Amino acid sequence: MSGFIEGEDRNQATLFPERLDDYVAEDSPVRVIDVFIDDLDISGLGFKAEANDTGRPAYHATTMLKIYVYGYLNRVQSSRRLEREAQRNVELMWLVGRLAPDFKTIADFRKDNGEAIRLVCREFVMLCKKLNLLTNAFVAIDGSKFKAVNNRDRNFTRAKMKRRLAEVEASIDRYLDQLASADRAEPAEDNTQRLEDKVAALKEEMARLKKLEVRMLEAPDKQLSQTDPDARSMYSRGSGMVGYNVQSAVDSQHHLIIAHEVTNLGSDRAQLAKMGKQAKAVLGRDKLKVVADRGYYNGDEIRACEQAGIEAYLPKPKTSGNRARGQFDRSEFHYKADDDEYECPAGERLIYRFTQMDKGKEIRRYWSSACTACPIKDKCTTGEYRRIGRWVHEAVLERAQARLDKQPGAMRLRRATVEHPFGTIKSWMGSTHFSMKTLPRVSTEMSLHVLAYNLKRVINLIGTRQLIAAIEA
Ligand code: SF4
């Protein structure tokens, strides 16, 4: 093979045996994992792995945690693959001192230490804070749907079940019709048998679906997922999927994930205050600015944020069809706080009439007696009067709108901030996304992904050596 670069002879003996440390680069991320985990107060974090006084000694939680963090940082998430990597991957051998737990031990550790792993993820965020990597500016809150292990065909909602039952019933009717016409035409015996077999199989399927329907109706939200009972059918990017809704609060300067939460609710409408409060607690600030998209718009949530010292920036969803119909939009009616009246586009005043409850909210009603003689009424209402409803805490929403008007770039900032973490994590996870089942385990999996994402991000920002020095300081 002359003319080509040649490798070393496998059987060549060396005078001084090489050390495992020689194979690990000085700036390898594995060195960061090593010092970060060694620096943690493992017992204080609540890891369950304990020393075994009798029988075979157990693996220390530090060892197991190192295997997982290394795995998630290098897109190796399955316990079986981690078992193999521990036996052949030089970096992992270096990291855990050539220990090679079997896949069951590896899997059990992740299963049994969800809360402690979540705290480790938080510890790293606190380290980022110590390194002044979390800005004083905005925190963007966003949710993204991640696929569960559960296949769409093994998830049933009322609508889906109704459709499936109707399809099976229609197929049975069709085959029964074919059987009837086959009887009249005296066909070959085997064709009749084939049709009868099909009808029998469909009847079995119908009985199976009926049993599933009973279980589905017993669930509080009338939904059944057969593989992962906690996964839920959700709407994502124009189509349905079965999965989880992962919420995150992301720092707008360095795109680090400050807080995260896995839910199985398809909507983001009840998540704003919870995520804002989590981010605020981590950052340890009295005040915080959060920016979110219109999917989070919810009066109670915006009010809860304000009460907690969180300024929310988010646009109001456009639900009214008035403008499309060529009629005045609600925004064209201006509230005059001093008089507690609205001014309409015709310059008339809508006065307070009464208060009523609407969907659990106290709503004050306003209208003007001038509507009946108004020259532009056809552009305003088809009813006798144009009525305006005002939530008793509407001032909270007006303040939120005023803030957003003063910060026109907030929504652009939100988009630029949140797309990076979710896009990166999803590409690491691959097409199937989560590999574990049930909400607590999926949450653990997400914590490991978030930790790996933040770790990689900080390494890219300040470099391995500086990060190691900061941890050791
Ligand atoms: S219809 Fe009534 S509310 Fe509408 S513009 Fe005329 S006076 Fe004002």
Image (spheres, rainbow, N blue to C red):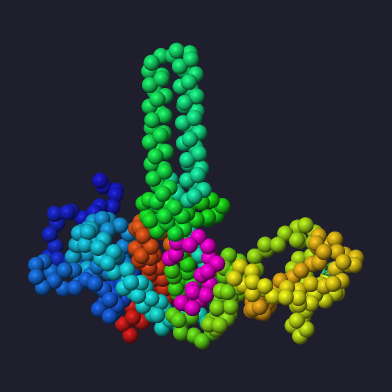
> Quick check: which quadrant has ligand 1?
bottom right
Residue 269 or residue 144, whichever sits in front: 269
Q: Which residues are magenta?
A: 262-278
| 107 drawn magenta | no
Looking at the rendered structure, the number of numbered marks drawn on it comes to 0
Q: Is residue 203 left or right of residue 66?
A: right
Give how far across and how far down residue 440 sits, in percent.
Answer: 36, 65
Quarter-wise, where is residue 109 in the image? bottom left
Give how far across and how far down residue 345 sits, in percent.
Answer: 83, 70
Residue 150 or residue 40, whichever sits in front: 150
Q: Is residue 28 left or right of residue 163?
A: left
Q: Is residue 320 left or right of residue 232?
A: right
Residue visible at 81% across and 60% down?
382
Residue 411 in sight in this render: no
| 264 drawn magenta | yes
Residue visible at 61% across and 68% down?
359
Quarter-wise, where is residue 10 in the image? bottom left
Quadrant (top left, top right, bottom left, bottom right) of the C terminus = bottom left
Residue visible at 40% across and 77% down?
125
Residue 47 in sight in this render: yes
Quarter-wise, where is residue 371 in the image? bottom right
Give how far across and how far down residue 386 sits, in percent.
Answer: 79, 67
Residue 186 or residue 152, whichever sits in front: 186
Residue visible at 38% across and 68% down?
447
Residue 160 or residue 17, whichever sits in front: 160
